[in-house]
Image (cartoon, grey):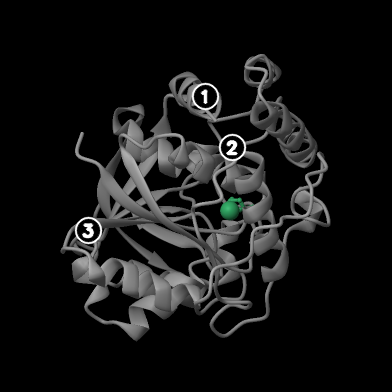
Amino acid sequence: MPRRSVIIDTDPSPDDAVAFLMALASPEELDVLAITTVAGNVPLPLTSKNARKALELAKRTATPVYAGAAAPLVRKLITAEYVHGRTGFDGYDLPEPAMPLAEGFAPEVIVELAMQRSPGEVTLCCLAPLTNIALALSKEPRLASHLREIVIMGGAFSEGGNITPAAEFNIFVDPEAAARVLGCGAPITMIPLDCTHQALTAPARLDKLRACGTPVTEAFYHLLKFNKIFDETKYGWVGGPLHDATVIAYLLAPGLFAGREVHVSVELGSAQTLGMTVVDWWSVLGKPPNVQFLRSVNADGYFDLVIERLARL
Ligand code: BDR
Ligand code: CA
C-alpha cells in the first residue's frame, strides 16, 4: 500500500484521539503532516489542549498541532460536554500539556501543507465539524483538485441522527461548512453513524485494550469507559460507538468497510432536519455521485486493528 500523507482535523474527545494516535502508530502506511483543531465537542481551547495531552501521553510531540476555527462559519457553536464531560476528556486525568501549539491558523496551514506537495498526495482526515476544511477550500480554490481524498466521519442515513432525529453531530454543528465540502469536487469518503453504530466499545474489547498494559492503552481504557456511559444510557447498548477511528481504519484497511458511490447533500433550509445528510442511495435524482458512502464495518476487525495500533505506542 503506497504511503499516504495525511492532515488530521479534529475536536478531541477520546475517539478523535484514538484516531490520530492510531495514525501516528502506523508510520509505514501514514505520514501525519499535522493535527489541526477546531471547535466541536468542546470549545477550541479545550480541543487544542486535548490534542496535545494525547500526543504527550504517547510521546509523539514532534507532530505539530495547529488551532483553527473557534466557531462555525455562520452559526453559534454547539458542544457536547453532556457526552464527553466538561473537559472533553473526562474519565482519566492527563497532565496539562507542556508542548505549545504550532504557529499558524489551521485552515491556512492545511492549504500550505497540501499545496506544497504533489497533486494527489495529501488526504484530509476529518473527525469534527468541517469549518476548517471549508475555510481552507475558500482560501485556495485549487485545493479540492489537489487533494488525494477527503475522508469524513460524519452524517447518517438509515441510522437517523444523534444530535437531532435527522442529523449527526459533526454535520449539524456546521452544516454550511459540510455543504461546501461535499460540493467541492474532491474525492470524498464518508463514514456515517450507520457504520460507527456497529462499532461499540463492548467490555471484552475494552478489556483487550487494557490488557496491552501500556500507559496509552490504560488511559484510553478509562477515557472510553467514561465515554460510553452516555451512549449506553441513550441507546440501551452495551458499549458506545468508537466513531472517529473508523477514518484511520479505513485508510489502513479499506476492506473492513462496505458502501457505494452516491450523491449526498446537506439540508440547510429546514429547522427540523437542519444538517441532515440526504443520501440518494437509489440514485432517484440521477445526479453524479460526490461521495463514497460507507454503511457497514467489520467491527471485530476494526477493534483488532485499533488495539494492535494503540499497543505500539
Ligand atoms: C462525532 O461527534 C463527536 O462527538 C465524535 O467525536 C464524532 O466525531 C460523532 O457524531
Ligand atoms: Ca470528533
- Relative height, residue 46 to residue 257 (above, below): below
Residue at the disc numbered 3: 289
Judged by depth in the image, the label closer to the viewer, 2 or 3, is 2
Whether tag 3 and tag 1 are in contact, CB under 8 A, the answer is: no
Res 65 quadrant in image? bottom right
Circle 1: element type: helix
CA gap, disc 1 and disc 2: 9 Å
| Mark 3 Cα shell of 10 Å, populated few (<14), some (14-19), many (≥20) | some
Q: Measured from the top left, where is residue 9 in percent x and y?
A: 48, 60
Q: Residue at x 59, y 45 (%)?
A: 17
Q: Is residue 240 left or right of residue 140?
A: right
Q: Position of residue 42 (x, y in %)?
A: 72, 63
Rate crowding at label 1 as few (under 14), some (14 to 19) or many (20 or more) other CA atoms within 10 Å: many
Q: CB of mark 1 within 8 Å of CB of mark 2? A: yes
Q: Which residue is mark 1?
A: 303
Considering depth in this image, is 207 or 201 the residue closer to the camera? Answer: 207
**Residue on which the image places disc 2:** 242
Mark 1 within 8 Å of ligand 1, using the beta carbon: no
> Circle 2 — which element?
loop
Q: Quadrant of the C terminus?
A: top right
- In the rendered structure, which amino acid carries the disc numbered 3? Pro
Which callout, 1 or 2, points at the residue further toward the start of the chain? 2
- Determine the secondary structure under disc 3: loop
Can residue 277 be seen here? The reply is yes
Tell which of 6 and 39 is nearer to you: 6
Residue 90, x across and y down, in percent: 81, 46
Residue 310 appears left or right of 252: right
